C-alpha cells in the first residue's frame, strides 16, 4: 500500500495574567486550524480525502497565596484529539478477506477534561514541607476498534468507532521534615482510581457494542530516612506499589500485583577517597508467570578518588555483584494482559574519569 499525508497548521496562542491581591489567574486559549489531505492506495482501493478542522483548547490556572509559605494552586484544561482522516472515509478494504477494514464517516473528535488542585505548606521550624494534591480526568468519545466475527466464514470486520470514555481520580500526600540535626524524613502516599472500558468482539449479527469495564486501584507509598554526620552518610528508602484490577466480566479474575523495594546507601568520605555500597532488595508478587514472583537482592559498590586540586576524579564501580538484577513489568487492560521481563549485563565493572576545567580568567 501507499499513503501520503499533507498537513497545514495555523495556530493562535493567547494567555493573560490577572492578579487580584493574593489571587493570580492565568486563562489561556489555543486555537488550531488543521487542513489535511490524505492519498491512500492499496490494491484496488484508491482514495483521496480533504478535511478542515478547528480545535479549541482552553485552560485556566489559579494560584492563591494564602500566607507566607502556604499556597493553593488549581488547574483546569480541555483538549481535543481529532480522528485519523483515513478512518473517517467511507471505504471498505477487503484486500485480506479474513480481516476487512471499514472506514467510518460518523467518527468524531475525542475530548479530554483535566482538573488538578494542590495545597503546599512550608514551615522553617523542623524544615517541614507538606503537599496535598487531588486530580480528575475524563475522556469523552474516545476512538476504539470494534471487531465483528463471522462464525460461518471465520472472517473479522474491523471499524473504528467513538466508544464509551473512562475516567480517573487521584489523591496524593507528600511530607518532609527534619527529625534531628542530621536526620531527614521523606514520605509520600498516593492513590489512583481508574475506570476504563474494553470492547468485546461482536459475533455474527450481534448489534450494539458490549463493554468489559475495568476498575483499577493503584496504591503507592514511599518512606525515606537520610542521615548525614561528618564523613558518614546513610540513606534508606522503602517503596510499596499495589495494583488491583477487577472487571465487570465475571469470566475474568481479579488481579493483584504487589511490588516492594528497599534501597540502602552507605557512603564514607576519608581524605580524597569516597567509598559507597548500595544493597537493594526487591519483592514481586501477583504475576501470572511464577518466574516473576520472586525476591531479588542486588548489590552495587564504588570507590572514587579526587586529585589535581579536586578537579579530577577517578571512579571504579562494580554493578550487580551478585548477578541478580532483573526488571519486570506488566500491562493489563480490560481486553489484554501482557507481562515482560528484562535482564541486564550482570556483574560488570566500570572505570570513569572526570575532569572539571577552570574557566575563570587569570
Image (cartoon, helix red, strand yellow):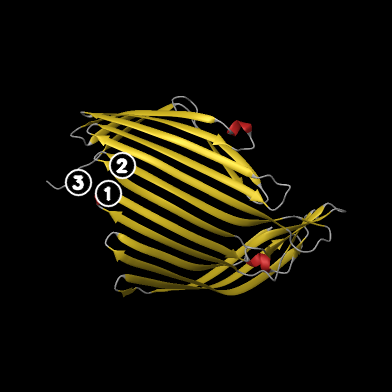
Q: Nearer the viewer, mark 3 or mark 2?
A: 2
- SS category of the residue bearing label 2: strand
| Residue in front for this viewpoint, 36 or 176 | 176
Q: Does 99 sit above or below residue 73?
A: above
Sequence-wise, the earlier of marks 2 and 1 is 1
Using the image, tell me which numbered label, if any, was put on residue 184. 2
For image coordinates 30% across by 31% down, the residue present is 267
Toward the top, the furthest residue is 322
**Mark toward the viewer: 1 or 3:** 1
Q: Nearer the viewer, residue 128 or 243?
A: 128
Nearer the observer, 179 or 347? 179
What residue did someone put label 1 on?
A: 127
Q: Which mark is residue 359?
A: 3
Image quarter of the N terminus: bottom right
**Does the residue at mark 2 contact the one at mark 1 (Cβ under 8 Å)?**
yes
Mark seen at residue 346: none
Q: Secondary structure at mark 3?
A: loop
Seen at 57% across and 74% down, the residue is: 53
CA distance for labels 3 and 2: 36 Å
Badge 2, how many Cα within 10 Å: few under 14, some, many 20+? some
Amino acid at each position: 500500500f501507499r499513503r501520503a499525508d499533507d498537513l497545514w497548521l495555523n495556530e493562535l496562542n493567547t494567555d493573560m495574567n490577572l492578579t487580584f491581591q493574593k489571587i493570580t489567574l492565568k486563562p489561556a486559549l489555543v486555537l488550531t486550524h488543521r487542513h489535511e489531505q490524505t492519498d491512500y492506495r492499496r490494491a484496488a482501493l484508491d482514495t483521496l480525502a480533504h478535511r478542515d478542522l478547528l480545535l479549541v483548547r482552553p485552560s485556566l490556572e489559579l494560584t492563591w497565596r494564602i500566607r507566607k509559605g502556604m499556597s493553593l494552586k488549581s488547574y483546569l484544561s480541555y483538549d481535543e484529539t481529532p480522528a485519523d482522516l483515513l478512518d473517517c472515509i467511507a471505504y471498505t478494504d477487503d484486500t485480506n478477506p479474513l480481516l476487512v477494514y471499514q472506514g467510518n464517516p460518523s467518527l468524531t473528535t475525542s475530548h479530554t477534561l483535566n482538573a488538578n488542585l494542590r495545597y503546599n505548606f512550608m514551615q522553617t521550624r523542623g524544615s517541614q514541607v507538606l503537599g496535598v494534591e487531588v486530580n480528575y480526568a475524563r475522556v469523552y468519545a474516545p476512538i476504539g476498534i470494534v471487531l465483528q466475527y463471522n462464525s460461518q466464514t471465520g472472517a473479522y470486520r474491523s471499524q473504528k468507532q467513538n466508544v464509551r470514555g473512562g475516567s480517573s481520580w487521584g489523591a496524593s500526600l507528600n511530607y518532609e521534615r527534619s527529625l534531628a540535626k542530621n536526620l531527614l524524613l521523606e514520605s509520600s502516599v498516593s492513590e489512583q482510581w481508574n475506570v476504563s472500558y474494553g470492547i468485546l468482539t461482536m459475533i455474527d449479527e450481534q448489534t450494539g457494542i458490549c463493554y468489559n469495564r475495568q476498575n483499577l486501584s493503584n496504591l503507592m507509598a514511599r518512606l525515606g530516612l537520610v542521615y548525614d554526620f561528618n564523613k558518614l552518610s546513610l540513606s534508606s528508602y522503602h517503596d510499596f506499589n499495589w495494583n488491583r484490577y477487577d472487571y465487570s466480566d465475571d469470566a475474568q479474575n481479579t488481579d493483584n500485583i504487589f511490588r516492594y523495594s528497599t534501597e540502602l546507601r552507605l557512603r564514607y568520605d576519608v581524605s580524597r577517597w569516597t567509598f559507597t555500597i548500595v544493597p537493594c532488595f526487591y519483592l514481586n508478587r501477583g504475576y501470572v508467570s511464577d518466574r516473576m514472583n520472586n525476591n531479588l537482592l542486588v548489590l552495587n559498590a564504588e570507590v572514587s578518588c579526587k586529585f589535581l586540586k579536586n578537579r579530577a576524579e577517578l571512579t571504579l564501580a562494580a554493578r550487580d555483584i551478585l548477578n541478580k538484577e532483573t526488571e519486570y513489568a506488566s500491562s493489563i487492560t480490560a481486553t489484554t494482559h501482557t507481562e515482560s521481563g528484562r535482564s541486564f549485563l550482570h556483574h560488570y565493572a566500570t572505570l570513569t574519569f572526570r575532569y572539571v576545567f577552570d574557566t575563570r580568567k587569570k
